[in-house]
Image: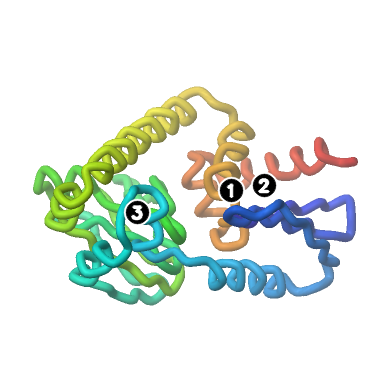
Amino acid sequence: MVQILNRPEKDIVWVVGLGFQEKNSIWFYKKNRQVSTVVGIIKTFFAMNDFTLTTYLTSNIDANKNVIEPLISHCKVKHFKKSEFLLRQGEKCKYSFFVEKGLLRQYSIDEKGKEHVILFAPEGWFMSDRDSVYFDQPSSYFIQAMEDTDLLFITDELIFQLAKEYPSFLEFNNRLLHNHIRQLQKRITQLLSATAEERYLDFIKIYPDLMLRVSQIQIASYLGITPESLSRVRKELAVKNQP
């Protein structure tokens, strides 16, 4: 993962790389250099890492790649351009989506037309509307590509087949589900009682690579605060972190 730490009191931007199975590394860039340089580094980082579903599964369960790949080969693979929708409110969601490249967001729109971001899904993440998929209900959410995105469409049939072939997958899938529920409970608690700073710091822990991929407006929507409040929190944290 990659985290951007902007230190306004210094003429540098700290880019902290948290790569898979790699030691943390730090690069320094003068602030007068274009932000696109840093964005390019982030894109290069993701291009160097393997976010395929096969790699994800073989890394987490005791499975043979030669058996997994034929099963996954039946999955629908689709490319979505930035701003395209996978799902709109009122439609039924029939798949879970695995992000091999790119970024998704899931959000709702209230009666006043205000957007509320529920979840982001960068590379190596799953996204779906479980209520719609498993209970055949019209979705309350939109799912949209925030970047050009490559996805695998995962069906219930694949889940059942993997569980049949690999008992360890069933345990792993249950663990994912319970972890998802735990994170949702934590998110509800934070929105009810945590300070804006606490929410922001938790966002950085969960999504350390999204700081230059998601707008401040989107981050504020996810945190349940205004963009102005987010800007104030970031400035206060910069002052606290002065060496």
Q: Identify the residue position indicated by label 1 in the image.
A: 227
Quadrant, the N terminus: bottom right
Distance, label 2 to label 1, CA atoms, is 6 Å
Distance, label 3 to label 2, CA atoms, is 29 Å
Could you say which quadrant of the image residue 232 lies in? top right
Disc 3 or 1, which lies upstream in sequence?
3
> Residue, x 18% and y 52% (percent of image)?
165
Q: Identify the residue position indicated by label 3 in the image.
A: 126
Foreground pick, 149 / 116: 149
Could you say which quadrant of the image residue 161 lies in? bottom left
Disc 2 residue crowd, few under 14, some 14–19, many 20+, Cα 10 Å:
few
Asked if the residue under mark 1 is in contact with the one under mark 3, i.e. CB atoms within 8 Å, the reply is no
Which percent across, then down, holds residue 26?
77, 57
Color encoding of the figure: rainbow
**Tag 1: amino acid:** Pro
Could you say which quadrant of the image residue 57 lies in? bottom left
Residue 75 higher or lower than 98, as above or below: below
Q: State whether residue 52 appears in this view.
A: yes
Q: Helix, strand or loop at disc 3? A: strand
Q: Identify the residue position indicated by label 2 in the image.
A: 231
Which percent across, then down, holds residue 2?
63, 57
Distance, label 3 to label 1, CA atoms, is 27 Å
Left or right: residue 65 compared with residue 132: right
> Residue, x 34% and y 47% (percent of image)?
112
Asked if the residue under mark 1 is in contact with the one under mark 2, i.e. CB atoms within 8 Å, the reply is yes
**Tag 3: amino acid:** Phe
Disc 3 or 2, which lies upstream in sequence?
3
**Tag 2: amino acid:** Ser
> Residue, x 34% and y 48% (percent of image)?
61
